[in-house]
Every structure is written in structure tokens, then in C-alpha cells.
Amino acid sequence: MTSCIYFLVIFLSVCLTVFGQKFGLEQFNLVSYTQCRFDSDCVKISKNSFCFDNDADKIGNCKCRDGFDMVSRNRTFFACLGPAGYNEACEKNMQCQLILTENAECYNLACRCKDGAHLFTDGRCYVSVLLGDFCQSDGNCWMTGDNFGTCKFGRCSCKFDREVANEDKVSCVIGRDLGELCSNDAECTLTPNTQCRVSCRCAAGFVLSRNQTTCLSAATNFFDSCEETDQCSAFLTGSICTSNKCTCPEGFHGYSNRCIKSAAIGSSCSSTEECIPEAKYSDTVQCTGGTCKCVQGMISEMLGCNRGHNFAISLVGLIISIVFCRIL
């Protein structure tokens, strides 16, 4: 009965080996194919092994000690491999990954972190993440000089207050406030939307807030959102911030990128822009003889030019012509 069990174990081991070789799988077996009478028979082939299931009248097989895995090489050779730490001797990636995580590999018979990964202070390998990029733990946030940042709200950032990511994203520099001297744009990132121009200033397209602590987006069109009037007047001459929208003061209207005094039909004017809100209406209303007038035959309810108005103008013109002719 014992012999049957023994041969069954050997048969299963052979089957597993053949299966693994066929499908490219690594084999980790409980016992080797190597027979033995004494522990020394096994140790001379691979340390951390012993002779298993042997006695005075029975030949055993070499087996790995607890904590070590067996890699069957052939019928006369095997190796018992245990976990290996960073820079420790290894033969298989598996040995390194047991301690260093899946981000480790066995390279030139020594464990190391894979390319794109690094060793953290806890003795494990982590994927390297740049400052500002997504992270899972502090271990991802590697910086130059074997320093580390911190994973905060899912992104790598500098550890200490007033530190900001340098332009290389693998080191930190002391941040500067608006108006303070600086050497590169990275130093100014304590305040969003800034750049370094000798000192930290608002970037193009932004204006300094009234309290001089933030940079606000400058409006480029009338009715853009705003918090302060400077946002409107930066690119829209004469515009003011009213109810969080860039508009013109009462009695003025937006024309192109500036506020123009408004003049209704029949009112005095100095330019056509005063009579119309946009250049496309210049064929409808014009400033003629110092007065805003509808162009003959043009209709625009918005501007106050309609058929009745044009008819009235035509009728008045006709009456004047008739009277003038009779006088002559």
C-alpha cells in the first residue's frame, strides 16, 4: 500500500511537470524526483532541503524545508528557493515578489525594483509617480535624493507647508506669494494662475484681485462671469461687474471690446457706434448729420426701425417735396 502511494506521488509530480512545460508554467512541487537516504544527499544539491519519507529500509525523496518553494529542474536536480529581499540573491522573480511586491524582479541573480518602480522605506517596491500625478499611497511619491512626498487626496504632493513641486516634478521648492521674488514659474504655484516675471505675478489672461492675494480670470466678452470690475475692464474698456456679469454702465452699451454711449433713433450722436450694438447693424442705422437715423428701407424692430417709421419718413419727405414744388 505504501509503495502504491509513493509511486502515485511520483506519477503526479511527473504529470505536473509535463503540464507545466507544455503550457509554460513555473512548477512548485512538494517533493523532488531526487531520491535520498540521508538529508545530506539533498543538501548537496540544494540547501534548505531534507530527505523526506525515508527510513532504514526505505528510500525517500528530497523536499524543501518550510518557507521554501521547490522548482523542479530535471530528475537529478532541483532548487529550494525562499523569499529574497532587495539586492539579495535570487533565481526567480517569484522570490523577490514575495517580499518586494509584484513591482520587483530577479535581475542578474539579485532582487531589484522593476524599471519605473523604486524601493520605499518599508522595504517594498512601488510604482514611481510624479508630483501632481495620481497615487495610491505615499510609497508612490518618489523624489530625487531618495526623498518621498505624500499622497494627498489621491495625488502626490510635497510634504511640508509652503513647499511646491519643482518644474521637474521630482523635487520640491519653497513657494512664493504674489509680489515676491522668484526664479521659475514653479515657485509661484502657491497661488493658481501665476507666473514668474522677476516676481510672482498673474499670468496672461488673469488680473490681480482687489485684496492682492489671488488671480482672477479676465473677461473677454460682455456678460462673462466676474467677481470684480477689474476682470471686466482689463480687455473690455469701460466695462463694470454688475450682478456677477460684465456689462456697461447705465446709458452705455457694449460695442466690440468697449463701452459706447448709447443713442436712440432720433437722438444726437457723434458716431454710428453710438446708435448700434454691433457692426453688423451699420447698414440699418447710421449717425447722419449728428443724429441716429434708420437707413431708408431697412427694418429692425430691435433698433426701432420698422415699416411704419420708414413710411412716416417717406410721407414727410413727399409732403416737403410737394410744398417745395408749389412754392417754386
Image (cartoon, rainbow, N blue to C red):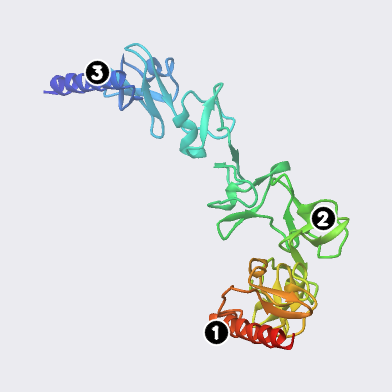
Q: Quadrant of residue 86?
A: top right
On screen, residue 289 versus residue 130, left or right, reads right
Residue topped by disc 3: 14
Q: Identify residue type, mark 2.
A: Cys
Camera-nearest label, 3 or 1: 1
Q: Identify residue type, mark 3.
A: Val
Q: Quadrant of residue 256?
A: bottom right
Are the residues tagged 3 and 1 within 8 Å (C-beta)? no
Task: Say which label, 2 or 1, has the lower sequence index.
Answer: 2
Check disc 2 and report its element: helix, strand or loop: strand
Task: Say which label, 3 or 1, has the lower sequence index.
Answer: 3
On screen, residue 256 versus residue 15, left or right, reads right
Image location (x, y in percent) of residue 294: 65, 77
User: For residue 308, which numbered disc appears in the image?
Assistant: 1
* Residue for point 47% across, 35% down: 97
Image location (x, y in percent) of residue 25: 33, 24
User: For residue 196, which numbered disc appears in the image?
Assistant: 2
